[in-house]
Image (tube, grey):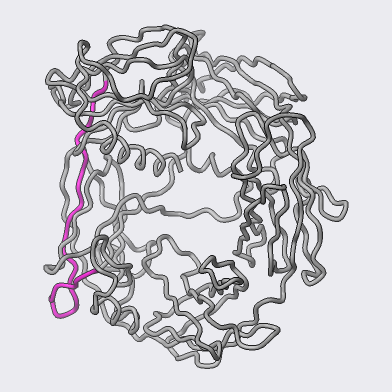
Amino acid sequence: MRRYFLALVTFALAVNVVGQTASPSAPNTSSVPTKETKPLGTVSGRVVTAADGSPLRGAHAALIPVNSRSDQHMYAAVSDDDGRFLVKDVPAGKYTFFAVRAGYVQQHYKSHGTDEGAVLTLSPGQKIDEVLFRLTRAAVITGRVMDEDSEPLVGVRVVALQKPSEDELEDEGASSARRQELRPVGGDQTDDRGLYRIFGLQPGEYYIRASDKDEPTQGVSSTDSEFWVQRYLGSEYAPTYFPGVPQVGQAEVISLKPGEETQADLTLRRIQTAEVAGHVISPNGPAKRAMVQLAPKDQQDFASQYEDTTDDAGSFKMKGVPPGSYILWVYQSPNQDYQYEMSAQQKLEVSGENIESLTVAVGIGATIEGRVRSSTPGSFTTGRLHLSLAAIDEDNLGSWHGIVNKDGTFELKSVRDGNYAVHLWGLEQGWYMKSVRFGGEDVLEKGLQLENASAGGHLEIVVSSASAQLEGSVVEDDQPLVEATVRVTPDPETPYNKFRRSGTRTDQAGHFSFPSPAPGKYQVIARSPAPAENGHPKSEPQSITLSEHDKKTLDLKIVKPEPQ
């Protein structure tokens, strides 16, 4: 998720720091005046090209507090004609630090290529000088999408996909029930000539996928008749991977070098599609104005999603659905305020023959009500909290979400039988979910087990501010290791406590810190940023138990494997 977060940050920089100059003598207006009483620091350096070291004017250098909330400050500056930047008035703390410029790949502080780099630790009043960012030219994939008659196809969604990195897989953890083999990292929509262009790609290997099912282009009126006709008729063509195959296992990998532009043309072929129609019924009769969505079971993007809204008779119809395995979802708006809640799901196989009398029953699940309360005094705010139930079973792909009211109460309706992990989003720094109980059962240990959903039940969630602190250092060859990845994993890790898994990077001195882990038993391991023949060297896992208000230090040593 970091990739998408930082993409949004890049956009924010383009909006918020326009017009700034960043030479050492120029004022820095990128940060709002702070109430910090400690001396403020500065960070300066240069941004140049990786190819020949030429200075890059107009690059954005930005610092974002680690574990940042959306309302925290960003500190940023723009490079001048010599590529120099100066960020002033930065409070002491730990930061994600990077530079970015249009046409180049974002680079992080002390990173090896395009990885996430090291954390920058800034002491009160500290001046960090001569930071050097070497930006690599971004790559481009472009091409043309045609039909079987070599005519251009307009409005086709083309997506660049990549296999997840080792870091991303470790972020998910061993208990992850559903891992996507490929993940979208960029995309475009074909124009009237059938042309697309996916830019801003970092060097690496990509798969290309094209589908004629898409949402309207941004900036185009939603009344565009061609889009709505296509949406009504559904797809005519099968989703296709480059160089023109239906399955990702048959696809060719496109390898991109820095600044390279590669062409990948595709031909989409017409297929026999089906119509999926039926009724949604509730205990009180037809479910009116329910949203019905049909998405591929192994969906990697939203381009192949089909949807309709039921009429007064509860009827729905979706045309042009290609053969495949799907999940049908039904969402209802209980108060008719267009705030939809998921109320049903079921698997569906489409073989090319019409499905005309599908019946989906809603409103038969449980109503789970509950409360969030604090076990410790403090400024505990419930106004921003969101509760989620994530299905663990492979056969149950649903999730339920609810908002915690100001008095700490919440209610989730139509929850189906199944096994769920419970998580609370939006807790302030230092707070953690201490316990979750349902009918006397420990949900953090066994999950939320619903076997007779219609019975409902009460979910009691206790939060606490008595979190612990964990810090330490990582060395390799008896030297501090910068940019090492350090991961803390619950021991044992289960689908129900997986949200307590956390990761960070060492700073410029080889130090790391986890400011507020929940008390419990953990395994801690460090991984070198530099790959070896058999992967990245790692430290031996260390076991640690944290109690409330604990402050513990841990030293980790990377051991390089012996050459074979």
Q: Where residue 465 sits: x, y (%)?
A: 71, 29
User: Total of numbered circles in the picture?
Assistant: 0
Picture layout, residue 44 above or below residue 419? above
Q: Where residue 456 sits: x, y (%)?
A: 79, 66
Residue drawn at x 21%, y 71% is 267
Locate residue 551: give its quadrant: top right
Picture layout, residue 171 above or below residue 456? above
Residue drawn at x 70%, y 31% is 518
User: Does 414 appear in magenta?
Assistant: no
Q: Nearer the viewer, residue 562 or 245?
A: 245
Q: Where residue 540 sits: x, y (%)?
A: 62, 24
Locate residue 126: give its quadrant: top left
Residue drawn at x 33%, y 84% is 233
Taking 44 as reference, is 165 left or right? right
Residue drawn at x 49%, y 88% is 277
Q: Nearer the viewer, residue 410 or 391?
A: 410
Taking 377 as reference, is 266 left or right? left
User: Does 135 appear in magenta?
Assistant: yes
Taking 259 as reference, is 454 left or right? right
Taking 326 as reference, is 234 left or right? left
Q: Nearer the viewer, residue 134 or 372?
A: 372
Please give the range of residues in magenta. 133-155
Picture layout, residue 81 above or below residue 428? above
Q: Where residue 440 sits: x, y (%)?
A: 88, 51
